[in-house]
Image (tube, rainbow, N blue to C red):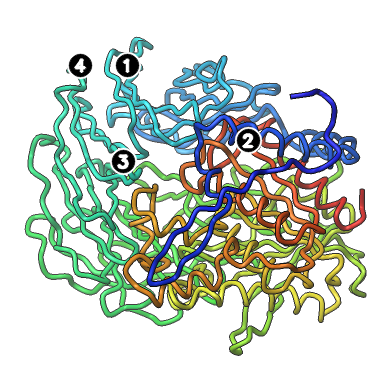
Amino acid sequence: MTTDMPTTPPAVRQVPAERTFHGDTVTDEFAWLAEKENPDTIAYLEAENAWTKAATAHLSDLQSTVFEEIKGRTQETDLSVPSRKGGYWYYTRTVEGKQYGIQCRVPAAPDEADPPATGDGAPLPGEEVLLDGNELAEGKNFFALGTFDITPDGDRLAYSVDFDGDERFTLKVKDLRTGEVLADEVPDTFYGSAWSADGSTLFYITVDDAWRPNKVWRHIVGQPASDDVVIFEEADERFWVGVELSRSEKFIIIDANSKVTSEVRVIDASAPTAEPALIRERVQGVEYSIEHHGHRFLILHNENAEDFAVAWTSVDNPGEWVELIPHQPGTRLESVDAFQRHIVISQRRDGLTGLRVMADGSTDSYDMEFPEPIYSVGLAGNPEYDTNVVRISYTSMITPDSVYDVDLITRAMVLRKQKPVLGEFNPDDYEQFREWANAADGTKVPISVVARKGVTRDGTAPLLLYGYGSYEISMDPYFSIARLSLLDRGVVYAIAHVRGGGEMGRRWYEEGKMLAKKNTFTDFVAAAEALVASSWTSADRLVARGGSAGGLLMGAIANIAPEAFAGIVAQVPFVDPLTSILDPSLPLTVTEWEEWGNPLENADVYAYMKSYSPYENVAKLKYPAILAVTSLNDTRVLYHEPAKWVARLRAVAPDGSYLLKTEMGAGHGGPSGRYDAWKEEAFVTAWILGTVGLA
């Protein structure tokens, strides 16, 4: 390739390929871009990168400025609040100039209740480095840590690494007494692991050819991986498996989950060779999870409880479920965490997260209270079972990430650390709001908004609207250092809490999936229109942004309401869902059928998905400017979806501005190092500012 900057987008050849389902024949002229090993594919992606670089060259100074702003506001040498487990305080350090975190610990005195002060982020006295991501990543273009799991006695560490971004990890074991990495090594493992009580046995997970975690293995430290034994295998292709050690360190928990059904087994952690014991057989449509709590297992479930309830069953003889917390419509119970003398329930109501505390042996409970009108709160770590103090994380659109320790008896709340924001940041310079949009069917859709004080609501302010809306994942209000580069230039930031997410409970999710998926898209358009109608912005100053399934949302709104947006940022976007969900050999496809429907077997699902698939519905429209960002090694949303989408946009609607940027050595999350991630965010931010005329 020439070093000269291209002056036009790259040409891409069209090779018509036909497919027929349910009597419907379609032609995909860019299907060949799925051939990852084809040199022409790589050449095309590199040519697109060159064009994107040329087309955004005028933004390079702004990109550099934004990067320096992000970097300058971040305390680069920092230290997380140490968490107590056993005889140690565990924490993560970052060092100025280094990309990755360093996992560390220091000894804890028996009666030491308060964590060591983190000071200026320097190493704590007596520090032991457990794992240095910078050393592991040396000479690599990508690095990600999967498992990080320490034995109950603190003597061994299981960890796994990925150097490609495809989320296939190599599992290793380190003896923390000697610092030696042992010969034990298992390639191609998945997230999740669990140690036996004595630290002699490690349980881990592998995936099948479709990247579905389907097997739980038992490995005895010191023995070759070839001797490892499969202790559970899930045959149903809709289900994936997980494994963990209970907080009490008494049970190995093995769960099998589809999108709508669960089944759990346990092994006594002191008897690692025992057969897994079933808690309750799966019942289609019933989801449940367990927490060990003394003589009982707590069970979070949705049997006759749309927003979930909590029951318990005996540890010695699991059977009947005895009600503990009844179902309360409108209050979605999301998780239950058990401590020796308390239970903490994570919940959401009226679009806000919350924490409820219940003492053991009592049905009385109280909710933790927080002052801001919109915020996000949740438990943070808490590895100790025998404790009266829990750690929580708290943030809002204007409050940086904050860590509190809460005494469950006195209810006293102690701020341990708030994420530093360097420079002249003052939260009083910003305001946050809760707005509501009216969806087409009359549903009220919440919107979280943040702006710098003084922004005039006369329709002239630029606005960035973010959305996701799938898998019951909630996009709760949160603080972002990088976002300040937008807010301080007068850009308003908003999150549309559209259906398909979980912000308003289980029904909110149900009304944005399967044959109701289009509600996700129309909710987002309604949010955009509401923000214009309330004079926050105007359509020619409004940019939309979303990633992964939120990238599907971006592609859909580009087709159904292109006039409502000046620009769209689609990151690792799921924009060719019909093609992917029709192919059961692809990663995640079969497990996704309970989220999107099965177009392979159901003609109605096929027709419905085809009617909203962004790639299928590209038309000769006046599209807003589009920036698509993807990664070559992404396993979750394959790179060729946005590559094909951009190629078809140019072919069908050639007058638009479409850019494709591919990370050639990364996965679903993009660049792995923090400085590289900041550069990527600075690039996207500069493009957004350029699109709304603030370059």
Residue 42 sits in quarter? top right
Q: Are marks 1 and 2 in contact (CB under 8 Å)?
A: no
* Image quarter of the N terminus: top right
Q: Which residue is mark 4?
A: 222
Q: Position of residue 444 (x, y in %)?
A: 62, 83
Q: Nearer the viewer, mark 4 or mark 3?
A: 3
The secondary element bearing badge 2 is classed as strand
Q: Residue placed at 43% from the left, 66% from the top? A: 356
| Neighbours of disc 4 within 10 Å: few (<14), some (14-19), many (20+) | few
Q: Which mark is residue 175?
A: 1
Q: Nearer the viewer, mark 2 or mark 4?
A: 2
Q: Residue placed at 83% from the left, 71% from the top? A: 539
Position of 529 with respect to 193 (left or right) is right
The secondary element bearing badge 1 is classed as strand
Q: Residue placed at 32% from the left, 52% from the top? A: 339
Position of 441 with respect to 113 (left or right) is right
| Neighbours of disc 1 within 10 Å: few (<14), some (14-19), many (20+) | some
Q: Are marks 3 and 1 in contact (CB under 8 Å)?
A: no
The secondary element bearing badge 4 is classed as loop
Query: If you read the primary sequence from the N terminus, does the residue marked by circle 1 or circle 4 appear first?
Result: 1
Residue 12 sits in quarter? top right
Q: Which mark is residue 209?
A: 3
Query: If you read the primary sequence from the N terminus, does the residue marked by circle 4 or circle 3 appear first?
Result: 3
| Neighbours of disc 2 within 10 Å: few (<14), some (14-19), many (20+) | many
Q: CA distance from mark 1 to mark 4?
A: 11 Å
Considering depth in this image, is 512 or 348 the residue closer to the camera? 512
Q: Position of residue 367 (x, y in %)?
A: 48, 69
Q: CA distance from mark 3 to mark 2?
A: 24 Å
Position of 691 with respect to 188 (left or right) is right
Most extreme residue toward the bottom is 442
Q: Which mark is residue 663?
A: 2
Q: Are marks 2 and 4 in contact (CB under 8 Å)?
A: no
